[in-house]
């Protein structure tokens, strides 16, 4: 039980709360404080609140607001990371009381944004803290990787000299009033502006305290924004185009500070061809992309984006035979990607059935030079009017004038119609012949069944294969309904014992064992004579119980020559002494190391140790 607990200040870092408690508690050693508050006496983690459950148990007597969620959401940097991680990852981390964190929250790869190695603070904030509270504290916002300015005072943060990641043991550091006087770093105006923008986006996320979003949320929104920027297609070029856009948008010095300038050949940008890598992208880099593509993190999370390469419509109808020609009545556009050049295209679909295609860069269909090549479908109105022109026997020149098409195009349409009519006629004739023949064969099949009522389906088929084959192809449903039921015959496949096969496998096994040393030489290492390995060499995929039943002689021989694990270890020791240390004096540890026997079982250790020691002594006497 504790008799005092410091009231946490707004955005105070979890570590800072512990440090202030230590300062006022009078504990001689920091480990006492850490053990008392968190139940741990090991090193401090500056990113996650290790031991928080123990702290909450002791601190909640001072305020009912002190809970696990209270400290996580208000005094750690987890709210910045949480929206971008999988929900299961966050639940597992918190559920394990933060013991399961193998890596830091921001990654530890060489090309990741580097963690801060020191505590940072704003001198103006510190001055206000001492003036208002009589003491200072560490702001969680200022400790986030990539944050080097204060959004409240728009000045650079100052680095405290203590290296927080190389503290030997445990140390609690609190701000001093003398820290206010330290000199601040000056940034170029464009770098300062980028740093402030990033800091504002981080501030927004900490304030909103979002839960985890699904990876699809980010992937789909990013792709929409890439489309709006005109760099989404071709998909294989997304990464390079986005990289160039980012390098042109942010100052190089700013990207260098965030280890994100692409100096190495590797790129930290996702490929944006699936949502798999979205959850591995660092939060700060997410914010860089959001600011680049839509203006800010606030805009990204609070606005909906729709890709409309052709505007909002309505669009004009290009059907010259409709009464709404050139009027804005088209309300539907179907956007797709061209299969060959991967460019964006849109099919404008009018209610009259007329469909024409435009490219994303085209402003008006009236400006398209060869527009007739863009007509995807003419529709029922156009076809109806065209048929009327044919019935009225209008000349080709007049039809071409009314349809806004050339005379060769009209001639081609007429030729295609004739071919289509001929094709339809042929199909109709073919269908009639098939129907007549099917009816005829049905009668024959019925007669066969009446003549041979006891015959099976197979026997009726043998009587007239042509009829059965035809009906199966053109009216299978009728044939099934008018045929005898299929008689199911079950044939056992169980094989009996074969002496020949057993002897054959036995001889093969004996030959393998007699040439085992050659087998090991080919693989350049010792191999244990195990049941599994012999089965694999012989090609016997069954479990060993099946082999005992099918090939008892072979199974008995295998069981008589297999090596136990201990026998194989001893053979390995003998081999090392005979081959590697031949004519050399050697120690016990050298033999154990060379034999790879460092991880043998504890209960076998003494016996094997004595065996190795005995062989080493005998070897060194020679």
Image: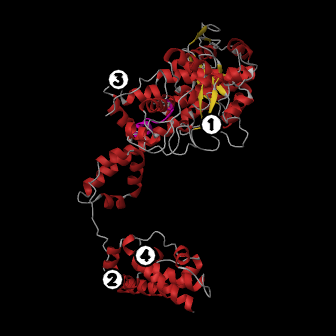
Camera-near label (1 vs 3) is 3
**Nearer to us in this view, 195 or 280:** 195
Q: Which residue is mark 2?
A: 552
Regarding residue 564, the answer to whether it shows in the image is no
Between the residue at mark 4 and the residue at mark 3, the CA separation in whole angstroms equals 66 Å
Label 1 to label 3: alpha-carbon separation: 34 Å
Residue 166 placed where, x, y %?
58, 43
N-terminal-most mark, 4 or 1: 1
User: The residue tagged with tag 2: helix, strand or loop?
Assistant: helix
Numbered circles on residues, count? 4
Q: Is residue 269 visible?
A: yes
Whichever of labels 1 and 2 marks the residue nearer the N terminus, that label is: 1
Question: Which of the numbered marks, if any, corresponds to residue 535?
Answer: 4
Does residue 344 appear left or right of residue 460 in this picture? right
Question: Who's the residue at 63% across and 23% down the image?
Answer: 149
| Residue 197 percent coordinates (x, y) | 63, 21
Name the disc covering residue 65, or none: 3
Q: Tell me how far mark 1 sits from mark 2, CA to CA.
A: 65 Å
Which residue in the structure is indicated by mark 1?
113
Q: Which residues are magenta?
A: 81-94
Secondary structure beneath dot 3 equals loop
Q: Is residue 197 above or below residue 615?
A: above
In primary-sequence order, the first of circles 1 and 3 is 3
> Eyeballing the image, is 477 above or below 178?
below
């Amino acid at each position: 039980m504790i008799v005092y607990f410091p009231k946490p200040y707004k955005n105070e870092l979890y570590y800072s709360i512990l440090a202030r408690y230590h300062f006022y508690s009078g504990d001689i050693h920091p480990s006492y404080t850490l053990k008392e508050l968190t139940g741990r006496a090991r090193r401090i983690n500056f990113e996650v609140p290790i031991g928080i459950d123990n702290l909450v148990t002791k601190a909640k007597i001072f305020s009912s607001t002190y809970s696990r969620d209270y400290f996580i959401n208000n005094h750690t940097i987890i709210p910045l990371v949480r929206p971008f991680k999988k929900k299961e990852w966050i639940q597992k981390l918190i559920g394990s009381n933060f013991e399961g964190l193998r890596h830091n929250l921001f990654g530890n790869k060489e090309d990741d944004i580097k963690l801060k190695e020191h505590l940072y603070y704003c001198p103006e904030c510190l001055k206000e803290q001492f003036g208002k509270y009589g003491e200072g504290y560490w702001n969680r916002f200022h400790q986030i990787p990539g944050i080097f300015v204060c959004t409240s005072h728009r000045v650079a943060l100052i680095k405290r000299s203590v290296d927080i990641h190389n503290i030997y043991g445990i140390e609690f550091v609190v701000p001093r009033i003398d820290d206010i006087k330290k000199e601040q770093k000056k940034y170029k105006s464009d770098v300062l502006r980028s740093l402030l923008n990033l800091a504002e986006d981080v501030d927004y996320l900490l304030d909103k305290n979002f839960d985890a979003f699904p990876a699809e949320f980010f992937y789909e929104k990013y792709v929409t924004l890439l489309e709006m920027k005109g760099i989404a297609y071709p998909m294989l070029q997304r990464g390079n185009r986005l990289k160039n856009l980012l390098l042109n948008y942010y100052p190089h010095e700013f990207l260098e500070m965030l280890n994100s300038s692409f100096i190495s050949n590797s790129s930290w940008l996702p490929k944006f061809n699936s949502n798999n890598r979205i959850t591995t992208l660092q939060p700060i880099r997410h914010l860089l992309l959001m600011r680049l593509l839509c203006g800010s993190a606030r805009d990204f999370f609070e606005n909906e984006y729709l890709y409309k390469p052709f505007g909002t419509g309505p669009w004009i109808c290009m059907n010259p035979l409709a009464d709404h020609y050139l009027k804005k009545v088209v309300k539907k556009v179907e956007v797709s990607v061209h299969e060959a050049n991967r460019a964006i295209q849109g099919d404008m679909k009018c209610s009259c059935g007329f469909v024409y295609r435009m490219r994303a860069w085209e402003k008006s269909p009236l400006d398209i030079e060869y527009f007739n090549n863009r007509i995807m479908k003419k529709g029922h109105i156009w076809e109806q009017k065209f048929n009327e022109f044919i019935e009225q026997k209008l000349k080709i020149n007049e039809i071409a004038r009314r349809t806004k098409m050339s005379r060769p195009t009209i001639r081609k349409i007429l030729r295609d119609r004739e071919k289509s009519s001929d094709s339809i006629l042929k199909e109709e004739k073919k269908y009639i012949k098939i129907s007549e023949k099917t009816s005829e064969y049905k009668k024959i099949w019925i007669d066969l069944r009446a003549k041979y009522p006891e015959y099976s389906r197979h026997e009726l088929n043998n009587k007239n294969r042509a009829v059965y084959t035809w009906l199966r192809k053109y009216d299978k449903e009728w044939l099934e309904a008018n045929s005898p039921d299929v008689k199911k015959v079950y044939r056992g496949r169980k094989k009996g014992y074969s002496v020949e096969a057993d002897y054959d496998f036995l001889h093969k096994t004996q030959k393998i064992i007699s040439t085992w040393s050659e087998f090991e030489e080919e693989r350049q290492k010792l191999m244990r004579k195990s049941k599994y390995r012999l089965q694999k060499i012989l090609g016997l995929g069954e479990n060993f119980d099946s082999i005992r039943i099918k090939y008892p002689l072979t199974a008995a021989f295998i069981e008589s020559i297999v090596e136990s694990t201990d026998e194989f270890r001893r053979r390995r020791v003998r081999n090392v002494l005979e081959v590697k240390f031949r004519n050399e004096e050697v120690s016990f540890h050298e033999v154990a190391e060379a034999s790879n026997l460092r991880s043998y079982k504890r209960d076998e250790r003494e016996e094997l140790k004595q065996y190795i020691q005995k062989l080493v002594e005998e070897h060194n006497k020679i």
